[in-house]
Amino acid sequence: MTIDLISDTVTKPTPAMMEAMMHAEVGDDVFKMDPTVNALQEKVAKLFGMEDALFFPSGTMANQAAIKLHTQPGDQLICDKYAHVYNYEGGGAAFNSGVTCKLIDGDRGMFSAAQLAAAIAGRADIHVPFSRLVCIENTTNKGGGACWDFSELERVQKVAKDNNLAFHLDGARLFNALVAKKETPAQYGALFDTISICLSKGLGAPIGSILLGSKVHIAKALRIRKLFGGAMRQTGFLAAAAIYALDHHVERLADDHLKAKQLGRVLQEVSYVTKVEPIETNIIIFYVDEKIGATHFIEIMKGKNILLTPMGEGRIRIVTHLDYTDEMHETLLKELKKDQFY
């Protein structure tokens, strides 16, 4: 038995999800003739109270499309130093849109309205890039699955609006935050200009993300998706999996969160772990004793068929997910408690 906790992207479709996929009604989505894709887009737009939505093959492409539709080459987007759009999208903001990133030194991937106001203060002339877009990520990946405080998001949005800045949410794991904080999609739909949601992480679909926005934004995004090579044909097979995930896999995210917190408590008790970052959702980030080292610890665990991932700076990440069973959980808890890694 291999216990793969490198990400929540490693899940495979459940038998019921596969059944939904195999019976999907499909058409050519490039011509907007795939009924299942259309149903998915309408379903998510309605859920968030936004005008329109567009299915993408990946979260990175959805984010990059949002950046491009909100900016022009030479502009600047503002995000936290831990933001996925800056750290893990291959420099796409510069390559695809010709924009630079101004980084805010926030806390676990989250910054305050005051920090945003300070970041945009100062000169605004031909010598400096114009700020056009604010990107936030909820939950924060590099920040260990942290959830933004919604009232702070409202304050951040006000600063953005007062300064004519577009407001984009990288909501790759937004449903984890909604479940953990008992918030609603409509709250977020009312706050952001555009939202991307990954369907292949905690929700367990095999492929795909959704970008939400106004009809004008999504019309632009449709052109950008084509430009980026993201237009697909009989995509309804994938959309059917996403619809199934939205209908059946949201509330169960609480199980992933519970398992993550149980693992965190064990990690806090063993001698070889020096720090465990706060755990709110399904991501655990921890540090081991320098005598062991993160790389060596990961290799030891790999030898036990337990797969973890490094996050740099001595950080190790565990991500719980749909395919992480109770049996796997008990096995991992026992292994961590052995405390024999020196």
Image (spheres, grey):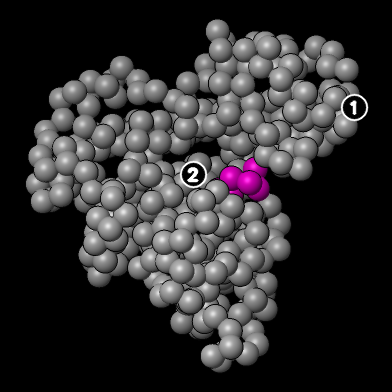
State the image coordinates of residue 220 (x, y, percent, origin top left): 26, 66
Amino acid type at circle 1 is Lys
Residue 26: which quarter of the image? top left
State the image coordinates of residue 277 (x, y, percent, origin top left): 74, 41
Which residue is label 1 attached to? 291
Residue 245: which quarter of the image? top left
Q: Is residue 105 above or below residue 13?
A: below
Amino acid type at circle 2 is Arg
Q: Quadrant of the C terminus?
A: top right
First to last magenta residue range: 137-144
Label whose residue precedes the other's in the sequence (1 or 2): 2
The residue depicted at 21 percent of the width and 38 percent of the height is: 235
Disc 1, SS:
loop
**Residue density around tag 1, few if under 14, some if 14–19, many if 20 or more, within 10 Å:** few
The residue depicted at 55 percent of the width and 48 percent of the height is: 88
Query: Pointers 1 and 2 in contact (CB under 8 A)?
Result: no
State the image coordinates of residue 112 (x, y, percent, origin top left): 65, 67
**Residue sitting at the far front:** 95
Q: Is residue 191 visible?
A: no
Disc 2, SS:
loop
Horizontally, residue 251 falls left or right of residue 24, namely right
The residue depicted at 63 percent of the width and 46 percent of the height is: 142
Horizontally, residue 36 falls left or right of residue 10, namely left
Tag shown at residue 323: none
Q: Is residue 244 above or below residue 208?
A: above
* Along the viewing direction, whichever of 105 and 187 lies nearer the viewer: 105
Horizontally, residue 136 falls left or right of residue 44, namely right
Q: How many marks?
A: 2
* Along the viewing direction, whichever of 144 and 232 lies nearer the viewer: 232
Which residue is label 2 attached to? 173
Q: Is residue 140 above or below residue 240?
A: below
